[in-house]
Amino acid sequence: MAMKLTFRQLEEEDALAILNWRYAFPYDYYNFDATALQENLPYMLDPENAFYAIANLQGELEGYCSFGADGRVPGGDYTAEALDIGMGIRPDLVDRGCGKLYAQAVAGYGADRYRVQQLRVTIAQFNQRAQRVWEQLGFERVEKFVKLGTTEEFVIMVGANE
Ligand SMILES: CC(C)(COP(=O)(O)OP(=O)(O)OC[C@H]1O[C@@H](n2cnc3c(N)ncnc32)[C@H](O)[C@@H]1OP(=O)(O)O)[C@@H](O)C(=O)NCCC(=O)NCCS
């Protein structure tokens, strides 16, 4: 499937849409807390957190990604130098076999923008779907850990922009 994607800095309108996205169980884990809007909105719009909108050629929002601290989970070992990536695709567009294309575009954009070789994602252990996507891009699991203060397991996967 041909899919042309563009990246732009996240704007308030994008952030408000994303905060209202609702994923089906078990991915509802990724839903933003609607009651925490006053914290989440400035967080997403803070340039330090490097959130970007992923849009199609019509400019419609299809997903978002973040580069850096947002993608790290307390308890993981992040001493190696790598660009941490976080991402989410619009709920009505997931589960259609396009995950690899989105992830590839995000990895390529991040690697270009930050001029890094090593890319890293931290994914909840239960989220086999996301792990599969990054595995398909050649990423390898380098660590499994429990998020500090919780019993939630996460894996760290590392790869190169290809
Ligand atoms: C993670 C995400 C980008 C994946 O994109 P997607 O379009 O939903 O994924 P796809 O439909 O392409 O499926 C990817 C793979 O997972 C597989 N898969 C789907 N559900 C699965 C499950 N429950 N268990 C194991 N594998 C599963 C698919 O079969 C496919 O593998 P295949 O190519 O070998 O058939 C997207 O689901 C998303 O944004 N989710 C919400 C946020 C999130 O999970 N973030 C994680 C941090 S990266």
Image: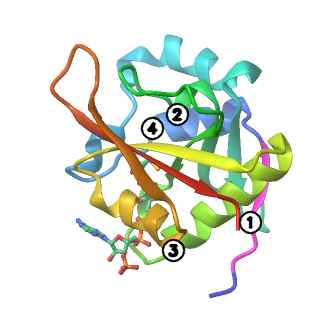
Q: Earlier in the sequence, mark 3 or mark 1?
A: 1
Task: Please state the quadrant of the image where ligand 1 appears.
Answer: bottom left
Along the horizontal axis of the image, is 112 left or right of 82? right
Q: Is residue 107 above or below residue 120?
A: below
Q: Secondary structure at mark 2?
A: helix
Q: Is residue 50 above or below residue 74?
A: below
Name the residue tied to disc 4: 20
Q: Secondary structure at mark 4?
A: loop
Q: Indicate whether residue 133 is drawn in magenta.
A: no
Decide: few, some or many residues near mark 3? Use Cα within 10 Å; few <14, some 14-19, many ≥20: some
Whether tag 4 and tag 3 are in contact, CB under 8 A, the answer is no
Q: Position of residue 16 (x, y in %)?
A: 57, 33
Q: Residue at x 62, y 48 (%)?
A: 119
Q: Earlier in the sequence, mark 4 or mark 1?
A: 1
Which of labels 4 and 2 is toward the front? Answer: 2
Name the residue tied to disc 2: 71
Q: CA distance from mark 4 to mark 2?
A: 20 Å
Q: Residue at x 48, y 72 (%)?
A: 136
Q: Residue at x 19, y 20 (%)?
A: 150
Going by the numbered disc 4, the residue's amino acid type is: Asn
Numbered circle sitting on residue 5? 1
